[in-house]
Amino acid sequence: MADPAPTLHRQFADPDLARQLLPHAFDRRDGAHDEAHLLRVWRNAERIAAVEGGDLRLLQAAAILHDCVWVDKASPERKLASRLAADRAVELLEGFGWQQEDIAAVAHAIHAHSFSAGITPETLEARILQDADRLDAIGLIGVARCFYVAGLGQRALYDPQDPAAEGRPLDDAAFALDHFQTKLLGLAEGFQTATGRALAKDRDASLRRFHDAFLAELG
């Protein structure tokens, strides 16, 4: 794996920890889950933690490593991605000499962050990471990431016969726009922290405006 941008680690609260972990943290095949995504998730987590509390060292490690194993969105193993990432994080942090209690906390946060995994976060850090990651899935950044991933999978932008899926089943494996209804438009209802919910309101509004405007342009 190629090294990430050489100065990116300086934008994290603990630059030394970021420099240590970033080379193991993402797969360049997926630009929706790249180093820029990790930095945005960390900034979201840091902003939430400033109000809610939480261990910033654990949060930073979890934010950096939460997508450290790449599984294609179309793969039947996609639901296992967060568990695989958690297992990989355990291996990495053990190699770096972390205490088992801290490793377990980071691993749980990573495992529980995923929408598809359906795991309830049991710690404050896990709740914050889940909110921080979901903030990056809504709003205009979420729109861009949605269409980027759809392009990687060679999916159509929308169904030209029924863009809003008014008379057919939703199929986000075929149409990018369907993913708004199958997932994105419901994410704001599932935030774990009060701060996360507050931050999600504006982004969710932007997401809905885009979706409505897109459909309006189609006539």
Image (cartoon, rainbow, N blue to C red):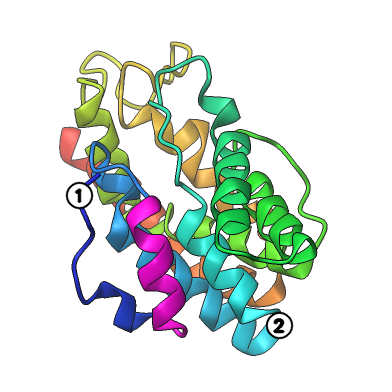
How far across and down, in percent of the image, does residue 3 sit? 22, 56
Comes first in the chain, label 2 or label 1: 1
- Looking at the picture, tell me which residue is in the foreground, 94 or 160: 94
Which mark is in front, 2 or 1? 1
- Looking at the picture, tell me which residue is in the foreground, 67 or 128: 67
Can residue 186 be seen here? The reply is yes
Neighbor class of circle 2 (other Cα within 10 Å; few <14, some 14-19, many 20+) is some
- The image quadrant where one finds the C terminus is top left
Does the residue at mark 2 contact the one at mark 1 (Cβ under 8 Å)? no
Neighbor class of circle 1 (other Cα within 10 Å; few <14, some 14-19, many 20+) is few
The alpha-carbon separation of the residues under discs 2 and 1 comes to 35 Å
How far across and down, in percent of the image, does residue 148 sit? 23, 39
Up/down of 213 relative to 141, above or below: above
Q: What residue type is labelled 2?
A: Glu
The quarter of the displayed image where residue 72 is located: top left
Chain part drawn in magenta: 13-24
Taking 34 as reference, is 97 left or right? Answer: right
Disc on res. 52: 2
The quarter of the displayed image where residue 54 is located: bottom right
Determine if the magenta segment contains residue 5: no
Up/down of 133 relative to 186, above or below: below
Q: Which amino acid does label 1 sit on?
A: Ala
- Looking at the picture, tell me which residue is in the foreground, 126 or 19: 19
Residue drawn at x 45%, y 38% is 69
Residue drawn at x 41%, y 79% is 16
Residue drawn at x 30%, y 29% is 176
Question: Which SS does the magenta portion mostly show?
Answer: helix
Residue at numbered disc 1: 2
Q: SS class of the residue under badge 2?
A: helix
Q: SS class of the residue under badge 1?
A: loop
How far across and down, in percent of the image, does residue 170 sit? 46, 19
